[in-house]
Amino acid sequence: MATSGNKQKYESKNPIQRALLDRFLDQVVALVERTRPRTILDVGCGEGFVLARLADAGVRADLYGLDLSETAVAEARERLGNRARIEVGDARTPPFDEPFDLVLMTEVLEHIPEPEAMLPVLDRLSRGHLILSVPWEPFFMGLNFLRGKNLSRFGNDPEHVNHWGRAGFQRFVGRRFEVVDAPLAFPWTLVLARKRPDA
């Protein structure tokens, strides 16, 4: 069975990649702690690496995860045990009744053919804040190319159908939400946003 790109990324032995990921996850934890949520939903949680980092960091919130992949969800459940509720499902028809204080969607929007269609979905799922991230282009592709990955595609991951620069992604998120912060998390663009007061 093929290993997902997400799992390969988080289980990489490359010390530079691991250092970048650790810094990125530290930034995510810091943003989560700023919002003090009671409930957190990770949309496209994959194998549960981000949720596990939140749990390991002692984030005091009820953790939930949602992913389309049964294989990824099975691994996330094994990784998190009773520390989170992980479900197989589509964010457009989630198996949860109530909106969440904080919704995470990290490293997912670059895979979705019509990402703008996800903004109202995320709006419905959240009652307060959102944390969103995508690769920071063109730097992400450049780093891939330099380490010999996806050379024939100039470093572009074949699963990535959308590409944003840092300012462009903030404008994209700002179409629906108020951007609160965008801390540097190279080579990713990371955004903390909240629902608009009049929403």
Image (spheres, helix red, strand yellow):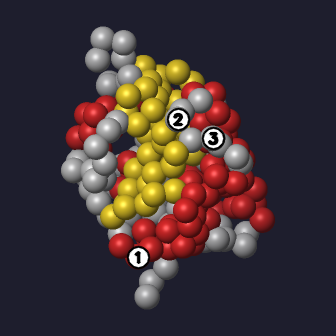
- The residue closer to the viewer here, 181 or 60, is 60
How far apart in space, not on screen, are marks 2 and 1 (Cα)?
28 Å
How far apart in space, not on screen, are marks 2 and 3 (Cα)?
7 Å
User: Which residue is pictured at 59% across the width and 29% down the height?
Assistant: 36
Q: Earlier in the sequence, mark 2 or mark 1?
A: 2
Q: Secondary structure at mark 1?
A: helix
Q: Secondary structure at mark 2?
A: loop
In the image, 125: left or right of 73?
Answer: left
Label at residue 60: 3
Q: Which residue is mark 2?
A: 38
Q: Earlier in the sequence, mark 2 or mark 3?
A: 2
Amino acid type, residue under disc 1 in the picture: Thr
Rendering coords of residue 79 (x, y %): 58, 69
Of badges 3 and 1, nearer the viewer stands 3
Amino acid type, residue under disc 3 in the picture: Arg
Label at residue 71: 1
Q: Of all residues shown, which one is farthest toward the top?
A: 198
Rendering coords of residue 93 (x, y %): 21, 50
In the image, 196: left or right of 40?
Answer: left
Q: Of all residues shown, which one is farthest toward the front?
A: 82
- The residue closer to the viewer here, 198 or 106, is 198
Callout 3 crowding tier (Cα within 10 Å): few <14, some 14–19, many ≥20: some
User: Which residue is pictured at 38% across the width and 28% down the height?
Assistant: 127
Rendering coords of residue 50 (x, y %): 57, 54
Q: Secondary structure at mark 3?
A: loop
Residue 25 visible (yes or no):
yes
